Image: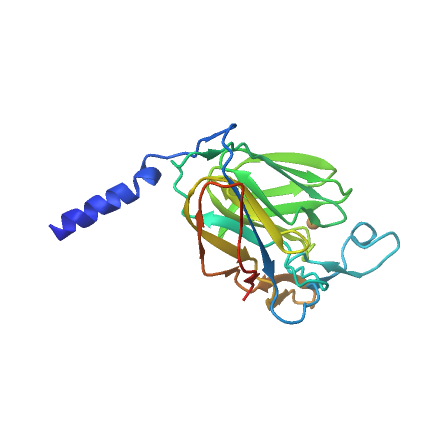
Amino acid sequence: MKTLILVLACMIGCASVCLGQKYEGSEDFEGTTVTGRVVWPGDAPDPLLLGASKNTDVCCGEGETACDKDSGRLTVNPENNGVKNCVVYLARYALDTPGKAFEKGAEINQLGCAYDPHVTFVQVGKKLVIRNSDDILHNVHGYLGNDTAFNLAMPLPAASKQKLKKPGRIELRCDAGHTWMTAWVWVIEHPYYTTTDADGNFSLSGVPDGVYELVVWHEGWEIVDTLESSDGKVTGYVFSEPLEMEPVEIVVEAGEFFDLPAEIVLE
Ligand SMILES: [Cu+2]
């Protein structure tokens, strides 16, 4: 009997996944705006800079032979300790809960040998446009875990469109020797995802009434290993694992705003 109950519970639990449940929002849905802030504990650290020595005319500046590039992997505001580019989202959102409208393609640009934006979101099945605005070869390699989601050589100023069908976090790296270039594309199934701004603030609009687990995620910012070729050239970095914080339970009830009562400390 216990087994039967367990099986039934599992069947109900996975029904949305098994049936290919899709989120459907509506234009006239209002909901509540959830706001909050993510801060760094203690003194603000410097950004993680990585050395650049390839295509330096474009990547560093005309006539330069080397420079340090901001990896974008850790950006803490020294004035207020706000942490930029944390991903804040409602975990385990039931996709059959009606909410705000959701049509989300995305675009990433490669300019000056950096990805812009550093973190972005694209809806499952929608288009991700990747541009190369530099007049040199970039090779965008997207990793979904250990798997390759796409791998695009982009030799000239050009654009490519990708339709991403699998939800998850894709890490971008440049396979054209630009070891400092990394970024993240989250392929998402509902609209309740956002990033923190330069002051660490975030805002999730149009949230329906309900009890949610709000999760803060930050990519790994420490260098665990440096990969080198036989002649001592840096060929890549292994970064520390992303930090996914304990979920914060929030209860959203009808109202225009819900401000988290305390700052979330990234630790
Ligand atoms: Cu590149």
Q: Residue at x 52, y 56 (%)?
A: 216
154 vs 6, left or right, is: right
* Relative depth, front residue between 47 and 153: 47
Question: Which residue reaches farthest bottom?
Answer: 42
21 vs 117, left or right, is: left
Residue 23 visible in the displayed image: yes
Check the image and report above or below for 41 versus 164. below
Tally of numbered tags: 0
Colouring style: rainbow
**Quarter occupied by the C terminus:** bottom right
Residue 144: % across, % down: 50, 49
Residue 240: % across, % down: 55, 65
Q: Residue at x 69, y 68 (%)?
A: 232
Question: Which residue reaches farthest front?
Answer: 255
Residue 184 visible in the displayed image: no
Question: Which residue reaches farthest right?
Answer: 63
* Relative depth, front residue between 256 and 266: 256
* Relative depth, front residue between 32 and 62: 32
* Relative depth, front residue between 39 and 226: 39
Residue 25: % across, % down: 47, 31
Q: Residue at x 32, y 34 (%)?
A: 19
Q: Residue at x 70, y 61 (%)?
A: 77
Q: Image quadrant of residue 220?
A: bottom right
Residue 237: % across, % down: 62, 62
133 vs 41, left or right, is: right
